[in-house]
Amino acid sequence: MAESENKGIDISPKKDSGVLKEIIKEGEGTTLPPQGSKVKVHYVGTLLDGTTFDSSRDRGQPFEFDLGKGSVIKAWDIGVATMKKGELAMLTCAPEYAYGKQGSPPNIPPDSTLKFEVEVLGWKGEDLSPSKDGGIERLQLTAGDGYSTPNEGAIVEVKLVGEYNGNIFDEREVSFSLGEGSDINIIEGVEKALEKFKKGEVSRLTIKPKYAFGSEGCAEFNVPPNAIVEYTVTLKSFEKAKESWSLDSEEKIEQGKLFKEKGTNYFKAGKLQLAVKMYKKVLSFLDFEKDEGPTSEDRKSLLLSSNLNLALCYLKLSEPFEAKNSATAALDIDEKNEKALFRRGQAYLAIGEPQLAADDFKTLLTVEPNNSAAKSQLAVCNKVLKEQLQKEKKIYANMFDKFAKMDTQREEEEKKKAPDVMSSLGEWGKEDREREPTEFEKENPNILMLNGSGEFQDM
């Protein structure tokens, strides 16, 4: 496609006239949308004969896409990356940068050169948050090299500059194990973002409180609660951590021991979340290994101790359901383990299951009869169970009283509805009941008298 046939500057990487750009209206400033950003545009697509095959303007709805991710035709990833906010340009796209030999039936024939009038309305950072809630946005300033990115556990060397309201609160170069950054006050948002960085990449991150310093803020950095912060991060180098699938059984055992040691150190330092992360790594490396061979005893020991330590961490973190699960996993390995029984009992108590807790403490006392802590906890269970029983009795008593009262009320209502037989029958009417006896009746009280109908009044 010759430039003489179509106006514009050749912006194709190979300079093969595959993408020609003609600026219709200049944009604002000098900033260009970075790779990975979500760009919002209006566009009108036409064939060379002027036939419109697609238009966001006709739909009245701007189009958004992730720049540089291959979600649109090549010409768009190339052309839009050169445009400023507010810029309006015509992109002329050769078939190999558009829909190629196949075209896009029925509107775009095979081997079609296309023209797109594109207006860039704006862009926002690429969403790197795990749940895609916009909590971590990346604007790439300098692209990195290659395709490899750090994995969890990788040793990363980074330069970072943290800002809040335009003021720098953190500026340093550090090396650390990815996933353990909180040990040196590196926030989760930076760590999550680094998993998407390539070597040499420089990006600006906008991080919401959930992935930054949360509702507590950071006194050390003078960052207030619920603050949105920004970091400019450079990934200078990294060394990937070994994945479990790449290790043999002995190497997994050695790696598991390292994770356990790290977890124990974090636990002693009161960094419980990091301790949990390390103990869980032990499980992820060893859980699916065969329970046989020369490493089986080491594996069993590591799994048992890691589950026991996880249960303890979760109890301290007030996560009793997780503690129960970890203690149960330990009991699956050693059904009479005193620590596992004790910690699961504590977890059951915390989630309101005193009977199950009591069962665990009783089992523990059959294994270790002199365990005073278990005796104390069992006493607590029995007290709670007694209180529950008294409460239930009171509830049931109140229920019975209520039902009895309802029955009495119902009987009274039924009585009110019943006819007054004695007052409605003629021989025992009001007049008969209230009149004074005659002299004859007084003198002869036992003689039956006839009423006006000729019937005995007593019958």
Image (cartoon, grey):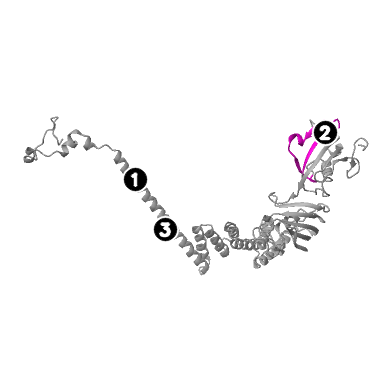
Give the labeled residue for mark 2.
46
Q: Check disc 1: other Cα within 10 Å, few if <14, some if 14-19, many if 20+.
A: few
Residue at image location 53% in from the left, 61% down from the top:
345
Q: Relative to the observer, which residue lies in front, 149 or 15?
A: 15
> Between tags 3 and 1, which lies in front?
1
Q: Amino acid at mark 3?
A: Gln
Q: Amino acid at mark 2?
A: Thr
Residue 371 in view of the camera: no
Question: Earlier along the polypeptide chain: callout 2 or callout 3?
Answer: 2
**If the image is split into quadrants, where does the C terminus sit?**
top left
Q: Relative to the observer, which residue lies in front, 321 or 13?
A: 13
- SS at circle 1: helix
Q: Is residue 451 left or right of residue 408?
A: left
Q: Is residue 322 left or right of residue 46?
A: left
**If the image is split into quadrants, where does the N terminus sit?**
top right
Give the labeled residue for mark 1.
407
Q: Amino acid at mark 1?
A: Asp
Question: Earlier along the polypeptide chain: callout 3 or callout 1?
Answer: 3
- SS at circle 3: helix
- Vertically, is 87 above or below 237? above
Q: Is residue 285 magenta?
A: no
The region drawn magenta spans 40-69
Q: Position of residue 121 (x, y in %)?
A: 77, 43
- SS at circle 2: strand
Give the labeled residue for mark 3.
390
Residue at image location 17% in from the left, 36% down from the top:
431
Label 2 to label 3: alpha-carbon separation: 81 Å
- Vertically, is 166 above or below 110? below
Question: Earlier along the polypeptide chain: callout 2 or callout 1?
Answer: 2
